[in-house]
Image: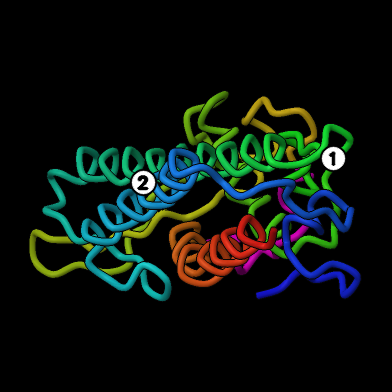
Amino acid sequence: MAADDPDFAYQLQTLAEATVSPDRRLSDTDRTRLSAAKRTVDQNYYELDEYIDGDLATNPIFLCHQSNRQEEAFEVLRLLHNYLSSLYSFNETVRVLFNRQTASQYTLTQGDFTPASGGTTKSYYGRKLGFLRGLRTDFQHGGFSCLSFEKAGELGAFGGYQIVFDEPAFLQESGLDEPSRFLRDSNGQEQRHPLCYLGQFQQDTLQAFYDDTVAWFEDV
């Protein structure tokens, strides 16, 4: 997926709001650093996907013995936290390398990656990232205060559960500064099942952004 704004050929240009190209190619070390950051996200996604019994992008249900529900639920949250943390680190890697490879007047800040933090609304990647950035920030402040576990069915002593997003709790209990800004670029239906949102983000939005970013770094 190319940048939303037709004036820019690459998504990094849209984030920077400038038709900027890298001054030089990535060193082998930096190329490895970028690919390793993406592989870490992919690995954390794989571990979460393996733990969920349903399809992560369409039906993210996990099955467990009902007496173990709390323990199993916390494991899902742990895996979710790992993914969100690695996604944040991936974006930071892209940001640092972008700033290193361009002239000093072109810089990206952490906030430039999402409209929720002051970045451009023209970035599709940034708009989709906003909700996930909100979940991570909530974890840092409130420990996933906005997530609950909803039973989707049962079979004997086993139950099927889904993680459900609680918007009122996010707005009132997260302790974030203006939490509603993280929800502006996604709707309630998308937000209701965060793992489904994450699955679609990983498979489509993130992969497209990564491929586009690699192409930008090679456009010297």
When the figure is inspected, residue 220 is found, relative to residue 28, above or below; the finding is: below
Q: Is residue 13 left or right of residue 82?
A: right
* Residue marked by disc 1: 106
Residue 159 sits in quarter = bottom left
x, y percentage for residue 98? 68, 43
When the figure is inspected, residue 153 is found, relative to residue 99, above or below; the finding is: below
x, y percentage for residue 149? 38, 50
Q: Secondary structure at mark 2?
A: helix
Residue 29 sits in quarter = top left
* Residue 141 lies in the magenta stretch: no
User: What is the spatial separation of the Cα atoms under label 1 and label 2, in whole angstroms?
Assistant: 27 Å
Residue type at mark 2: give it: Thr
- Neighbourhood count class around disc 2 (C-alpha, 10 Å): few under 14, some 14–19, many 20 upward: some
* Residue 182 lies in the magenta stretch: yes
Residue 55 sits in quarter = bottom left
Instruction: Please report the bounds of the magenta region as a residue range.
Output: 180-192
The residue located at (85%, 57%) in the rendering is 121
Q: Which mark is residue 40?
A: 2
When the figure is inspected, residue 190 is found, relative to residue 13, above or below; the finding is: below
Q: Nearer the viewer, mark 1 or mark 2?
A: 1
| Labels 1 & 2 near each other (Cβ < 8 A) | no
Q: Secondary structure at mark 1?
A: loop
Q: Is residue 58 left or right of residue 97?
A: left
The residue located at (78%, 60%) in the rendering is 123
x, y percentage for residue 65? 11, 53
